[in-house]
Image (cartoon, rainbow, N blue to C red):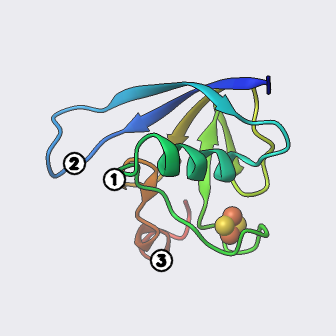
């Protein structure tokens, strides 16, 4: 029996939702996986509607920037934990769920 995680994922679609919510996924295999791999797994096996960015998978593009248990991380470089709350980076406008608007970085480079 593999070690299994409880993962709370921030969900919000500004085009439809009046407020954000968290969706909890129990029993998610997480050992030897990155946070990004765990999100992939949840999308493949539980809920394909979670929005998140994919990218280089090696820590250089910053496309997977998000917040895990209150700490800003690159999800592709962060080891998954047994209890995780996964949220979008708070300094950017939310496009949907974990996808943030990087265009703001060009317009407000002080972010
Ligand atoms: S996917 Fe490029 S930094 Fe994580």
x 57%, y 67%: residue: 54
Label 1 CA crowd tier, 10 Å (few <14, some 14–19, many 20+): some
Which picture quadrant has residue 86? Answer: top right
Image coordinates of residue 96 in percent, x first then y, are: 33, 53
Image coordinates of residue 100 in percent, x first then y, are: 43, 58
Residue under label 1? 96
Residue 85 lies left or right of residue 80; in this view the side is left
Which picture quadrant has residue 10? Answer: top left
Label 2 CA crowd tier, 10 Å (few <14, some 14–19, many 20+): some
Ligand 1 contact, mark 3 (Cβ < 8 Å): no
Residue 55 lies left or right of residue 97; in this view the side is right
Ligand 1 contact, mark 2 (Cβ < 8 Å): no
Marks 2/3: CA distance? 22 Å
Marks 3/1: CA distance? 19 Å
Confirm or deny contact between disc 1 and disc 2 (CB under 8 A): yes
Image coordinates of residue 101 in percent, x first then y, are: 40, 64
Q: Quadrant of the C terminus?
A: bottom right
| Viewer-side label of 3, 1 | 1
Q: Quadrant of the N terminus?
A: top right
Residue under label 2? 14
| Viewer-side label of 2, 3 | 2
Q: Which circle's residue, 3 or 1, is located before the other in the chain?
A: 1
Question: Which of 110 and 22 lies nearest the eye of the viewer?
Answer: 22
Residue under label 3? 106
């Amino acid at each position: 029996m593999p070690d299994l995680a409880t993962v709370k994922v921030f969900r919000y679609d500004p085009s439809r939702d009046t407020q954000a919510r968290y969706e909890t996924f129990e029993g998610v295999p997480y050992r030897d996986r990155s946070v990004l791999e765990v999100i992939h797994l949840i999308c493949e096996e539980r809920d394909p509607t979670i929005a998140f960015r994919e990218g280089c998978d090696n820590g250089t593009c910053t496309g997977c920037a998000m917040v895990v248990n209150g700490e800003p991380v690159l999800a592709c470089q962060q080891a998954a934990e047994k209890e995780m709350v996964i949220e979008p980076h708070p300094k950017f406008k939310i496009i949907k769920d974990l996808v943030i608007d990087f265009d703001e970085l060009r317009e407000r480079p002080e972010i």
